[in-house]
Image (spheres, rainbow, N blue to C red):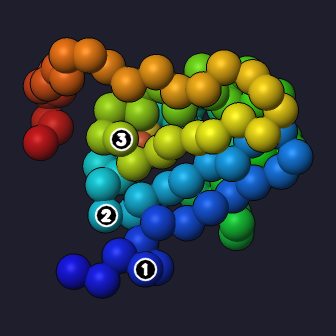
Amino acid sequence: MDTSDAIRHYADDAIDITYDAHRCIHAAECIRGLPAVFDSGRRPWITPPAASADEIAKVIAKCPSGALHFRRRDGGPEEIPQDPTTIEPAPGGP
Ligand code: SF4
């Protein structure tokens, strides 16, 4: 599989967000959680300057598929991987 165009970066001075379209299950946690930043009807659909890096990090932590990740560029706390990895079935989900 060619992943070169699957993972996209959306960044500003505070945070670098990566989005892997192949992993997204369209659960819309991101859109519900922070619609100013995540809006699938807009291009680009992710606009980091529309909220603080802390707010964005909090919403990305709720992404159930792992499609969204971030790296802080402002010295803020980095993502903490879940240990151990857990699987939570969702109604109507995969
Ligand atoms: S929260 Fe994650 S899985 Fe859900 S729509 Fe956003 S990127 Fe996709």
Name the residue tied to disc 3.
66
In the picture, the quarter occupied by the N terminus is bottom left
* Distance in Å between CA atoms under marks 2 and 1: 11 Å
61 w.r.t. 9: above or below: above
- Which quadrant of the figure has residue 31? top right
* Distance in Å between CA atoms under marks 3 and 1: 17 Å
Q: Earlier in the sequence, mark 3 or mark 1?
A: 1
Amino acid at dot 3: Gly
Residue labelled 1 has its Cβ within 8 Å of some atom of ligand 1 = no
Name the residue tied to disc 1.
4
CB contact under 8 Å: marks 2 and 3: no
In the image, residue 89 lies at what x, y percent?
12, 25
Judged from the image, the quadrant occupied by ligand 1 is top left
In the image, residue 63 lies at what x, y percent?
42, 33
10 w.r.t. 43: above or below: above
CB contact under 8 Å: marks 3 and 1: no
Q: Residues within 10 Å of mark 3 (few under 14, many from 20)?
A: some
Q: Residue at x 39, y 48 (%)?
A: 67
Q: Nearer the viewer, residue 94 or 11?
A: 11
Relative placement, left or right, of 4 versus 79 is: left
Residue labelled 3 has its Cβ within 8 Å of some atom of ligand 1 = yes
Q: Residues within 10 Å of mark 1 (few under 14, many from 20)?
A: few
Judge depth for marks 2 and 1 and give the one in front.
1
Name the residue tied to disc 2.
22
Relative placement, left or right, of 34 versus 59 is: right
* Distance in Å between CA atoms under marks 2 and 3: 10 Å
Q: How many marks?
A: 3
40 w.r.t. 43: above or below: above
Q: Earlier in the sequence, mark 2 or mark 1?
A: 1
Secondary structure beneath disc 1? loop
Amino acid at dot 2: His
